[in-house]
Image (cartoon, helix red, strand yellow):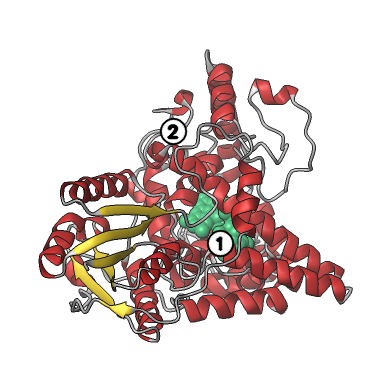
Amino acid sequence: MGAQLVWFKRDLRAHDHAGLAAAASSGGPVLCLYIVEPWLWAQPDYSGRHYAFLTETLADLDRALRARGGTLTVRTGEAVAVLDALHRQTPIDAIHAHEETGLIATWERDRAVAQWARRHSIAFIEHRQNGVIRALPSRNGWAKRWEAFMSQPVIPAPARFQDAGAPSEPIPAPEALGLAPDPCPGRQTGGRRQAVADLESFLFARGRDYRRAMSSPVSAFDACSRLSAHLALGAISVREAYQGAGRALTAHRAAGEVGFARSVESFISRLHWHCHFMQKFEDEPELATRDLHPAYRGARPEADPDTLKRWIEGRTGLPFLDACMRALDHTGWLNFRMRAMAAAFSSYHLWQDWKRPAQALARRFTDFEPGIHYPQFQMQSGVTGVNTPRIYNPVKQSMDQDPDGVFIARWVPELAALPAPFRHQPWTAPQGVLEAAGVQLGVTYTDRIVDHEQAAREAKAKLTALRRSAGHGPASDAIQARHGSRKSGLKQTGSATRRRKAKAAPDPAQGSLF
Ligand SMILES: Cc1cc2nc3c(=O)[nH]c(=O)nc-3n(C[C@H](O)[C@H](O)[C@H](O)COP(=O)(O)OP(=O)(O)OC[C@H]3O[C@@H](n4cnc5c(N)ncnc54)[C@H](O)[C@@H]3O)c2cc1C
């Protein structure tokens, strides 16, 4: 009897794992494999912090497999070459993987593996792991199917299975993959045990004020679930998070904790968004490289390297934005609203094409998930043609989300001695106040990269011209028909959807979905 090979990719868990359960139930030897793919780590959206988080998650997966009689075999190379070598040593009967919603390159790799498996008469079985539906003909009925999948019982981790005994190779050092040093001292720790702990502490303690606290970076680091990086590698499944939230909801309602229950409801709606965005990417992986709406293609120049560097390193001279970028560099995470503001600033105020900024942010986010990141970046950059463009004013956000300037003081220490009201816009401070605080604009803290109000006005005018261009409306309608949410009833800007009556109030932080 040949081995059942479980090819782990972005599903690094033993629980709720259809492929592992199927392989274990065969009763034969099981080969659990993770392939470190050098070509993947050479992509411009991957970085050292992703790799560090991955290695922690793999170590935890190995522990979980060992507790069940198995082990994780790690190999490095091209997937087909690795599988071919393994098959010669340990004949393989079937490969179990999950349906990966990924970059075009990962699609091509999966197709190559499928062809190789066919040539060797090996079954290649791809299991579904979240609410995304492969080869979806239409979005109609998608939300119901999401609910049905999430409500199915979580698949238990196999109690024990027989290990195929394929030896593991050491995990390559990041330098060996060409990854630049990427210290991220405040990064989350990877692994399922941490993921489960984060979910529990969110649902029963940290998440109480989630609805109110999620928008400000002062409170969001604690008040948000912080599950995204774990979900991106599949250390925990969306279904586990959904069902955990369902249990918390029941408990909070029974205890009369109305506010906490509403927070958990908001969290559940975001789990829908997770799959909603990934479904777009599943249907159109070109979203990583091409503006969704044709009218915006080539409308902005490719990002200027110096401008891009100032933006990503937090040296724009807009203190709150700079604080966000520096916090992100240090921690690998930022809350939704600040991500949206950062993306919008690069696309509107700086009027840069979104692709390089999107890659630069992807490298900073420990939770980089192509299927959320690229559709979100496009939406926040106003290139979908179906969402109301949202130009965040970084000074207004600063006053709203960090009224006392504590976040700025922490991450932009050059301004910490300024009285709080002037930290939001130091260029308005009287000379004497600046001097007393030891601030010299243009010397100790950079001058503004743009006058943000004027830049926003100019961006609005350019957008209006683009939206009035011939063919804009019909293309928007086609996009809405293909990718639009059928459930939200949110206000859209395509002409067909403008006619449809909105049923639910849009989430102010999210804007309209596309
Ligand atoms: C420009 C931009 C890029 C983004 N890139 C990513 C990314 O690479 N990976 C990623 O997971 N999220 C991304 N997001 C969405 C969102 O900001 C993060 O999911 C969230 O901040 C993660 O923190 P959390 O797990 O504590 O989220 P919570 O607020 O606790 O939400 C729970 C989960 O719901 C999902 N979710 C929440 N908000 C959204 C949203 N707006 N769209 C889609 N799914 C959502 C995520 O899976 C998240 O883990 C991006 C948003 C923007 C504006």
Where does label 1 land, which residue? 238
Q: What amino acid is at disc 1?
A: Val
Furthest residue toward bottom: 67
Quarter of the rendered structure image containing ligand 1: bottom right
What is the secondary structure assignment of the residue under circle 2? loop
Place of residue 344 in the rendered image (x, y in percent of width and height, measured from the top left): 54, 45
Mark 1 nearby-residue class (10 Å; few <14, some 14–19, many ≥20): many
Q: Residue 482 appears in which quarter of the rendering?
A: top right
Residue 1's place in the image compared with 70, above or below, is above
Decide which of 241, 162 is in the foreground and name it: 162
Q: Which badge, 1 or 2, comes first in the chain's sequence?
A: 1
Whether ligand 1 has any atom under 8 Å from the Cβ at mark 1 is answered as yes
Residue extending farthest top: 470
Q: Which amino acid, by three-letter code, is at mark 2?
A: Asp
- Is 389 displayed left or right of 46 in the figure? right
Q: At 50% across and 40% down in the image, what residue appears?
A: 280
| Mark 1 in CB contact with mark 2 (< 8 angstroms) | no
